[in-house]
Image (tube, helix red, strand yellow):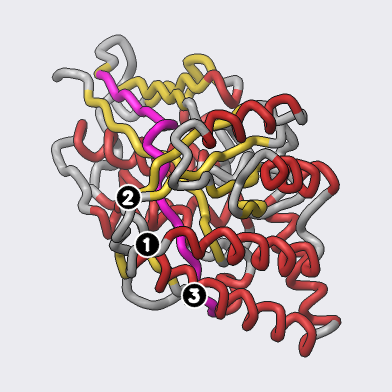
Amino acid sequence: MPATTATAPGKIILFGEHAVVYGQPALAVPVPAVRARAVVSPAPDLPRGEIRITAPAVALENAPWHGLPPDHPLAKAIALTLEAVNATPPPALRLRLSSTIPVAAGLGSGAAVTVALARALSAFLGHPLDNASVNVIAYEVEKIHHGTPSGIDNTVITYAQPVYFVRGQPLRTLTVRRPFTVVIADSGIPAPTAEAVSDVRRAAQAEPERFQALFAAVGRVVEAAYQAITHGTPEALGPLMDENHALLQQMGVSCPTLDRLVATAREAGAEGAKLSGGGRGGNIIALAPANAPEAAQAIARALESAGAARTIIARIG
């Protein structure tokens, strides 16, 4: 039985993080420049039902699956995939996981690993799962990573398409009428998404009127951004990014490092910039001017000089 490989892209949220948990829309896009990879291969030297995992990013080297806690993200992803394809016990196999997606940076590393794993494992077992089934598995694992996930990470990564996302509503893909370029800058600070989501929930419970107004304002920004993207006027996105960032600051999910990187991007010529993802760390995104081909590189250099751990230039659409 040959080895089976599957990959999944990273993702960024363009607009709408945090408010999306409370019923507002969000816009997110895949980032194919960074990817998670899963390779499943037969292990005839092991007894049936044995799965050995190698995942250097989480310090696993030939580790037995059954030795992991049941709520470990990889253990959960394997168990859900085996259940979905009715393969218990499975044949003996080895699973190797790798990723170029920075961990805890708001780029969907956890969801991408789960999606790649579910696809590779189900295909190896002869029952490749469809997107809807993979998405369900990834969402369940996201609960371990993030507590109360919106579902946006697993959705955009599973379908690998730009999406207009509203929690609990059918998937809507997003047509990018005119391509645009963003610079993604990783602050180098791990993004505690579950903690940030929990803090926003507590704050919203303490000040419901104020936070409902903030969430509604984010929703209006998202709708305006949707119109700009689908009608081919991406130059309108810059001021909307600035507005979205200001609203996230008011929710308490930015931090001095992210604010400094956002200011650096604007000073370097970005038409707008904002944090992307859970906040308190992770990454920012900056809109590069469409009429200046070298602008994205200049913005990226400025951000790296200002302390960004790494930058990615992503063309959207």
Q: Position of residue 139 (x, y in %)?
A: 45, 57
Label 1 vs label 3: CA separation?
Answer: 15 Å
State left or right for residue 149 relative to residue 210.
left
Which picture quadrant has residue 48? top left
Q: Position of residue 136 (x, y in %)?
A: 37, 59
Vertical relation: 176 (above or below) 59: below
Mark 2 surroundings: few (<14), some (14-19) or many (≥20) residues within 10 A: some
The magenta stretch is 23-41
Q: Residue at x 31, y 69 (%)?
A: 172
Sequence-wise first label, 1 or 2: 1
Predominant SS of the magenta segment: strand
Most extreme residue toward the top is 45
Going by the numbered disc 1, the residue's amino acid type is Val
Most extreme residue toward the bottom is 209
Q: Residue at x 56, y 71 (%)?
A: 20
Asked which secondary structure carries label 2, the reply is loop
Sequence-wise first label, 1 or 3: 1
Q: Position of residue 223 (x, y in %)?
A: 48, 76
Q: Which residue is mark 2?
A: 317
Sequence-wise first label, 2 or 3: 3
Q: Which residue is mark 3?
A: 224
Along the viewing direction, whichever of 290 and 78 lies nearer the viewer: 290
Along the viewing direction, whichever of 33 and 57 lies nearer the viewer: 33
Q: Residue at x 85, y 47 (%)?
A: 256
Label 2 vs label 3: CA separation?
Answer: 18 Å
Vertical relation: 55 (above or below) 295: above
Q: Which residue is mark 1?
A: 163
Mark 1 surroundings: few (<14), some (14-19) or many (≥20) residues within 10 A: many
